[in-house]
Amino acid sequence: MRAELAAALAALALAARVAPAAEVDRLPLADDRGALTDAALEALLAPAEFADELFTHTSAGDEAQYSLDVAADGAQVTAALAPSRIRWPSKGGVPATVRAEGLVLEAARPGIKLEELESVTVLWVLRPLGQVFSPRAAFELAVVEAQVRSAPGGETLFAYEEEQAPPRCRAAAAPGAPRCALTGVGKEARALAVDPEGRLLALAIGGLKPRVEMYALSSDLKLAWTALFPPSAGGVVEVAFSTDGRWVVALTGDGRIHRLDAATGGLHLAIPSRGRAARSIPPGRAVAVAGEAGEVTVWNLADGTIGWRLPPRDLRGPVDRLAASGNGARFATLEYDAARTVVRVWEIARRRMVAQIEVDPYAVADLALDETGGRLFVSHERDGLLAVDLAASGDRAVPRRFGGDAGARCRSRLQWLASASVLSCAVKEGVIELSADGRLRAELAAGGEESDWIVGAALDGAHTAAVGGGRLLIWIDAAGPAGGADGKRAGR
């Protein structure tokens, strides 16, 4: 990252932004030097936070002509715009790009002649979408409006207007379809969590503007508040609610735990740590934090004291994943080094290890424990979903494939839903839910594939969320934990 961009980000981390106005503000995209303005940069880093800001940019001269395609069919002139031909502003060497191609324009009046288009300007109105990282790092925008104007007179000759976006949430949805969908969410999301009662959703965001975004799961999926962290924090890597819903805990890449008021975002407590993964322990009074050297610390959230600390063991690699049983009696750790990968299960009350299972190196995506911690689930990058009965012994206490063909698709994030006795599993197409006996209980379709959806669910068993590719999706089950009888949850 260039020094110019790093300096701009540091300034943004310290600057206070005024809350977005009720009406959409239109601000310049570029400054006098042709670089992205600070306001545009901040909106591109956090598009959901500044959803009520649009940005304008004017193309003139050869640039305007190069972006304009004109054709004449008899006396009728048609026109289209190609935003990909524009050299958009950049910041610190990271360019802006526009997601659009071949925008068909409407004539502002009849009888427009070709010669009127020989000298024009193009006014672009753009909506920030966020960052993209492939095939190269860039800031992405979408065209909301465009006007081709005569020069020097300024008369609008042709215009484009984006179709009105559908509402974020619908009153009802077909079985398996999301009830709410929000685009423009940060593509650098690292984790999400839904509060126990399905009222709030927290996103952990890494990237150039580390933050926690809190959404109200209401009819419009509204951004409730944002907590910002300096770029030096290393991004927000984990987020978890206390089981009573009072607090949300964020773990930053520098290892510090931040306990925030879930309703307001106010910071109540900051705990120095050396963590890289975190998991709330039911009933929400403690959080387990795993460190780079393989240690695990169980912190009491009320006062920031240590309840239990496991020192690094024989493996010298980090603990990469944590899971907790629904009743808070046990938690599991995923540990690895260059030679092997081990899952260990711990009993909190007696402070002892109850099981150790070795799995293939570097092939585990996530862990989950059932309500009592008697069964361990492992999502495996090659073999799909595996399960281990921890009460068994010998050959019976080894990972075995679980869930049949549906379980074979589970190669990503897992979560046990205690209220519904359901295992939630991220797949490319969205989310699937498996009952305790391995049967497919529900399929929640995202309407598009992503390589790694991040999934979270509320303890009420009725709210499931997924984020991926800049989209946030919410499924709502009106029937609650009982669900539907046809394998797809009723009311979603």
Image (cartoon, rainbow, N blue to C red):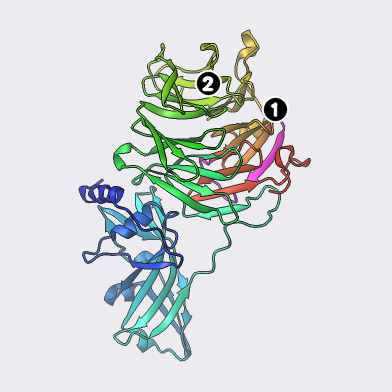
Indicate the position of residue 424 as horizontal and vertical percent values. Answer: 62, 35
**Type of amino acid under label 2:** Ala
- Asked whether residue 328 appears in the rendered view, the answer is yes
Indicate the position of residue 488 as horizontal and vertical percent values. Answer: 72, 43
Question: Relative to 41, does residue 450 appear above or below in the rendering?
Answer: above
| Left or right position of 484 against 43 | right
- Badge 2 density bin: few <14, some 14–19, many ≥20, Cα 10 Å: many
**Type of amino acid under label 1:** Ala
Question: Which SS does the magenta portion mostly show?
Answer: loop
Indicate the position of residue 278 as horizontal and vertical percent values. Answer: 46, 29
The image quarter containing residue 350 is top right
Q: What range is drawn magenta here?
A: 435-454
- Residue hosting label 1: 436
Q: Secondary structure at mark 1?
A: loop
- Residue hosting label 2: 332
Q: Residue at x 56, y 19 (%)?
A: 330
Check residue 374 in the rendering and tell me which mark sits there, or answer none. Answer: none
Q: Nearer the viewer, residue 485 or 59?
A: 485
| Left or right position of 61 against 188 | left
The image quarter containing residue 127 is bottom left
Question: Relative to 169, does residue 306 appear above or below in the rendering?
Answer: above
Q: Residue at x 60, y 51 (%)?
A: 447
Residue 241 within the magenta-colored segment of the rendering: no
Residue 437 within the magenta-colored segment of the rendering: yes
Question: Relative to 55, does residue 404 appear above or below in the rendering?
Answer: above
Between disc 1 and disc 2, whose residue precedes?
2
Indicate the position of residue 283 as horizontal and vertical percent values. Answer: 57, 28
- Badge 1 density bin: few <14, some 14–19, many ≥20, Cα 10 Å: some
Report the Cα–Cα distance between label 1 and label 2: 19 Å
Question: Relative to 146, does residue 285 appear above or below in the rendering?
Answer: above
